[in-house]
Amino acid sequence: MKKITTIVSICILSFFSGFVVTVVSHIGRVISEDRIAATVVAHCKTSGYKPACYDREIPKDTQSFSMEQSFGVTRRVQEIDTTYQYCHVLGHELAARETKKDPAKWKDVITRCPSGMCSNGCIHGAFQERFRTDTVPDDQLESIKSELLNVCEKRGSWMPTGMEQASCYHALGHLLMYITNARIEKALAFCDDLTTDFRSVCYDGSFMQIFQPLEPEDFALIKGKELTVESVTPFCLRFNGKMLGSCWSESWPLFREKFQIPEGLMSHCGFLPPDLQDRCFRALSYVMTVQMGFSEEKLEPYCSHLMPPFAARCFAMAASRFIETDWKNIDKALAWCKRVSSFDPDGECYLELSKTASFTVPRGSAEQKKICDGLPRNIQAECGRRP
């Protein structure tokens, strides 16, 4: 009996010891993340543009952290400074750093990326780091398809949302430019081979590599292929259909000043054939939401000056972008749709959030329920249903 009592005591002691170690470890990690976040915010307090400072300082101050811990610091920085919403570039950097540790595990890094924050920049970073320095010879291009064929599809315990899949295929478009040495036609043909449902976002990724280089490697990749306001029109007209639409919408950095007034955005998309104009408008409304720093005070007059039905659509895409950027913006998106309802008699803003509930957040999740419960009753019945 004494022997049994001793064994039970040892087991209980071992359990509690392990429990205590786990709790202490967790508390220590949280304290460490909080301390680093506070240091970063203090360092960037006087910066002219704080988001860029955060993007730079968080990786520097979390070099010994795991990717998950680094995103934990990011979340705490966002809680301290609520103006820091768009951390897509930081997501690139943190995933790239994790991928460098073992490039062979780049697909695993994708599955570890946090959902619902940093506008899925993490997924992009893992892709680009794996293939950043790889140009694949023509006779080996076909063989690499097997490695890429199902990378954006559900596998193992990874159950990506529609938005996460779209972001993954967008990143695929980027890396196809690397492995084809920026031969855009070849990259677009690969998009056709690797996906059907997400072809347009794959095209977007390839064209974006031309129009928005970020790192030195990106600039080196397109050297001699840079485009200007004068040369972009004949360049894009080389393509047809959805490829033309992607080229034209992704060219927006060349026309940044033009889009400061709503009429500029409308005229840019009006250049395209009628069947491509709506996607262009939606894409550029997404862009302008970020360009205006997610500020409702700036977005409301911008969207309201558009002619119907584009005003309502502009408001709707802003609401969707709030949530795509970070799931913590669900309340903000719902309040936004209510705020602009006088410009949106058909409730397009709420209808877009109903689609967001099925595409951007996981089915059956607390986030999906929160979106659906916040919609008008006549829309709630269809909320969260995949088309």
Image: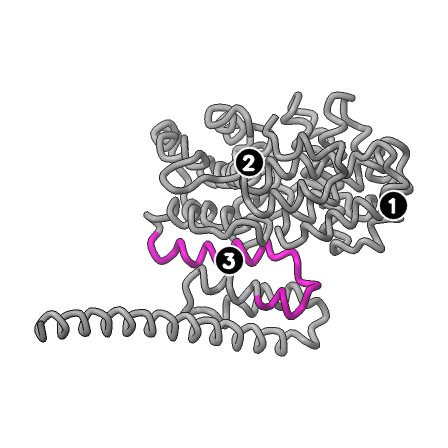
In the image: residue 7, left or right of residue 202: left
Instruction: Answer few, some or many: residues within 10 Å of disc 2's Cα (few below 14, many 20 plus, some between 14 and 19).
Output: some
Q: Quick one: quadrant of the C terminus?
A: top right
Residue located 41% across and 30% down the image: 149
Spatial CA distance of label 2 from label 1 is 32 Å
The residue that label 2 is drawn on is 162
Q: Nearer the viewer, mark 2 or mark 1?
A: 2
Q: Could you say where residue 222 lies in the image, as x and y percent from the top left?
A: 56, 43
Residue located 35% across and 50% down the image: 103
Q: Which residue type carries mark 3?
A: Glu
Quarter of the image holding residue 240? top right
Pick the front one: 154 or 169: 154
**Residue 79 in magenta stretch:** yes
Pick the front one: 179 or 194: 194
Magenta range is 76-102
**Residue 140 in magenta stretch:** no
Number of the label disc, if any, that sits on residue 261: 1
Q: Which secondary structure, mark 3?
A: helix
Above/below status of 288 relative to 207 = below
Q: Which secondary structure, mark 2?
A: helix
Q: Could you say where residue 130 lies in the image, as x and y percent from the top left?
A: 41, 47
Number of the label disc, if any, that sits on residue 338: none
Q: Which residue type carries mark 2?
A: Gly
Spatial CA distance of label 3 from label 2 is 23 Å
- Earlier sequence position, callout 2 versus callout 1: 2
Residue located 9% across and 72% down the image: 1
Q: Could you say where residue 210 lies in the image, as x and y percent from the top left?
A: 61, 41
Spatial CA distance of label 3 from label 1 is 33 Å
